[in-house]
Amino acid sequence: MLRMHKKRPGKFVIGIDIGGTNADAALYDCALKQICAQGKVPTDHSDYQRTLQDLLSSMSAQFPRDLQDIVAVNLSTTLSTNAILEGKGAPVNLVLIGFEKQERLISEIMGVIRPASLISIPGGHTSWGEERGEFDEAALRSCLSGHSRERFAVSGMFSPRNPAHEICAANIIQNEFDGVVSCGYELARSKLNAVKRTVTAYLNASLIPLIERFIDDAEKTVSSFGLTCPVMFLKSDSTLVSSRWCRKYPIETIFSGPAASMRGACHLVGAVNTRGLVVADIGGTSTDIGCVQDGSPVFSNEGASVGTYRTMVPSLEIRSIALGGDSEVKVSERGGLQIGPCRVVPFCRSGGKFLETGITCTEDYGYTPTDAINTLGKASINNVSLSKEASEWFGGVAGLPAEKFAERVWEKTTEKLETNIIEVIGWNKQYTRVYVGAPGAVFADAAAEKNVARIDAEDARVASAIGAATSAVELKCEATIVHSFEDETYTAFLPHAKLQGKDLELLLEQTERAIIEYLTKQAKLMGEADGHVKLARSYMYLTKKRVSDVVNSVTILAEFSPFSLEI
């Protein structure tokens, strides 16, 4: 579906989303701010490179211009999430610094993760960033004997307040033992929580080999099409990072798929006059639900959670449920219905196996909501006649005619989705509903009596790819300055260091300069060399008086925005 003028100069971005069932692509015109072309193919989990080749071939065929006009290829993927949930991460050794007297914390950590080995080293810091004990480098070197070229997660007590011991340990592991290291302080962003910080560093290290292979495949595939543009990746907070960043912090992509769909829905809806949106992205395997308020997606205050793992990864507030077009429908002996949680291939895509062998066909196939909407005439997906045959057979098991059975399946499916939407937004009718994903238009029609945004059905099918294409590089962090009334000093805790002084205004200036320098360096790693940092201060006082003598703390919020956003 080509919508651009062939001779008009401009810049274009290809967005790609690798989902559990399908992979989508969208071509975005940065100047006109519109989608020019789109594509969808089944995800080949045994060969992601082939999936990417199929999508780029589709985009290339629909792009009658010089490929050099494509300035970026942005990817979102569920690869990291699936690897964590399926336990497919690489083995990781865990180094704890200063935890020797923290048996409860160690027990809690070990109750969540299973490191290849646990190395406990004296050291660590206090909540004020002061050394709790001297870091024992000799003990670390002794424990590392026989662990060359392995992966490590390093977590020190109160490392966000002073990362010196983690940095020292990482240097020894990398320089003397050629190891791969993930440090807790790098992923904590100044926030405290020893268990979540350690788990996040561990999961990050376990994902590095997998994501490196995926990035290598993606970059080779893009290069094979003659594209010289950067390959970018969507993070869980719906912002972009370079492949270099993603290789180091793959954990930050765990919710990139849902984040992409939220971003895509916002783009498709545009300037809707509403106080908020609730977005339901209905895929083949699952549905992701999130909210947008005042034009911005709602963030999680707790960080992303994947299965039983609670992390410190900044993420949108997303509810994921095991409900999709390919969810298996089970009929009980009494005629009751269960939708999901398992995924099967709908009978409409069974290639005639249902007609040939009846219900005894391979267990990869089953009755799904997709077969139900085919039977009811709400969609025409693949072989509709096979869906009707399946509806007749399963309806017979439930004691119902084919269409009546399909209608019950559809009602059960919409009820399950509605229940979860209500749990997200409550009974607030001011939210405008947005349904995206392959069957999004069908669900939008079913909810017609509610406040529903109408968007193009073809665009809704590839909303995640549109979100990837329209995303941008952004970076945020914070620093906290705490007042010690005991000695009238102030201590600033930054993501990478701490500063101290007795003059609050002078320390504020020093902290803001340091945080600007830090964010600028981080932005270069993310793929943006030029931009500006916006700062905001938030003061907390001990009394109603707003004077420096009773300042309890100051939080500095910093946000990097690239100049390229102004294109």
Image (cartoon, rainbow, N blue to C red):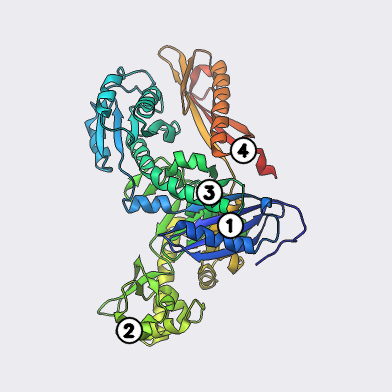
Q: CA distance from mark 2 to mark 4?
A: 58 Å
Q: Residues within 10 Å of mark 1 (few under 14, many from 20)?
A: many
The reply, left or right, for residue 295 in relation to residue 144 is: right
Q: Secondary structure at mark 1?
A: helix
Q: Which residue is mark 3?
A: 219
Left or right placement of residue 431 versus residue 178 in this view: right
Disc 1 to disc 2, how far (Cα)? 40 Å
Camera sees residue 238: no
Relative to residue 152, is residue 267 drawn left or right? right
Three-letter code, disc 1: Ile
Residue 97, horizontal then vertical, whole percent: 30, 26
Front position in the image: 327 or 51: 51
Query: What amino acid type is highlighted by mark number 3?
Result: Glu
Q: Residue at x 57, y 16 (%)?
A: 506
What residue sits right under mark 2 in the picture? Answer: 358
Q: Height in image: 339 above or below 393?
A: above
Mark 3 against mark 2, which lies toward the viewer?
3
Tell me the quarter of the picture where residue 168 sits. Answer: top left
Q: CA distance from mark 4 to mark 3?
A: 25 Å
Camera-nearest label, 4 or 3: 3
Sequence-wise, which precedes: disc 1 or disc 4? 1
Where does the image place residue 487, in percent across and percent down from the top left? 42, 11
- Label for residue 534? none
**Split into 4 quadrants, where in the image is the N terminus?**
bottom right
* Vertical comparison of 554 with 339: above or below: above
Task: Check disc 2 and report its element: helix, strand or loop.
Answer: helix
Q: Which residue is mark 1?
A: 466
**Residue position for label 4:** 561
Indicate the secondary structure of the residue bearing disc 4.
strand
